[in-house]
Image (cartoon, rainbow, N blue to C red):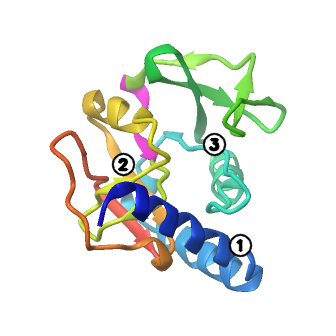
Amino acid sequence: MEKTRLRKLGLANLKWLQEHPELKEQKEHKISQTLFNDPCWKNAKTIAITKPLAFEFDTHIILHRGWQEGKQMLMPITGKNRTLTFHTVTPETVFEKTAFGVEEPQDASAVSNEIIDLVVVPGIVFTHDGFRIGFGGGFYDRFLKHYQGETCSLVFSEQIQEDWQAETFDLPVKRLFIS
């Protein structure tokens, strides 16, 4: 199946899950608990994550737990040439909505990619091998090409699709937490 069609199917599945909030919350809780007990979380001091759109995994759970545990939490800002830079966020951080509808931190300090221990990579469709289809901008593909640290994704079982072929530039996420 082609990526455009898979992306539409993945978005439809995520929106279906959004219409079933009890089920979505159960899955988010299970995935979060599995993440929090995993060495990739326990060993990380600096964690990069995104602020979710309404139908995506609610990462606020992850953010608050990170702050409770004294971890440095980061969120991306998209730049020219489809690049990502990561910036420290706190409970007081002010966010601004981009043209894509994504909220990015304002007046937040940028950090060097080398200090990031764990990147929680978003996506719409995944294979069990960790290959992913995002929104199509290639931001994370470009970032991951040069990033050497740990990566994971928080995945609903509704996002798993095996009937597609990853392209040569696609890089897999190292660890998937699925429910």
Considering every residue shown, the one lying at the far left of the view is: 168
Mark 3 to mark 2: distance in Å? 20 Å
Task: Tell me the kind of residue under disc 2.
Answer: Thr
- From the image, state whether disc 3 or disc 2 is nearer to you: 2
Nearest to N terminus: mark 1 or mark 2:
1
Asked whether 38 falls inside the magenta stretch, the response is: no
Chain part drawn in magenta: 114-120
User: Where 148 falls versus 77 (above or below)?
Assistant: below
Task: Judge the density around disc 3: few (<14), some (14-19), many (≥20) Cα neighbours within 10 Å.
Answer: few
The residue carrying pointer 1 sits among few (fewer than 14), some (14 to 19) or many (20 or more) residues within 10 Å by Cα, namely some
Instruction: Please tell me whether mark 3 sits on a helix, a strand or a loop.
Output: loop
Residue where numbered disc 2 is placed: 151
The residue depicted at 33 percent of the width and 60 percent of the height is 175
Q: Using the image, tell me which numbered label, if any, was put on residue 18.
A: 1
Q: Residue at x 24, y 45 (%)?
A: 170
Label 3: which residue?
A: 70
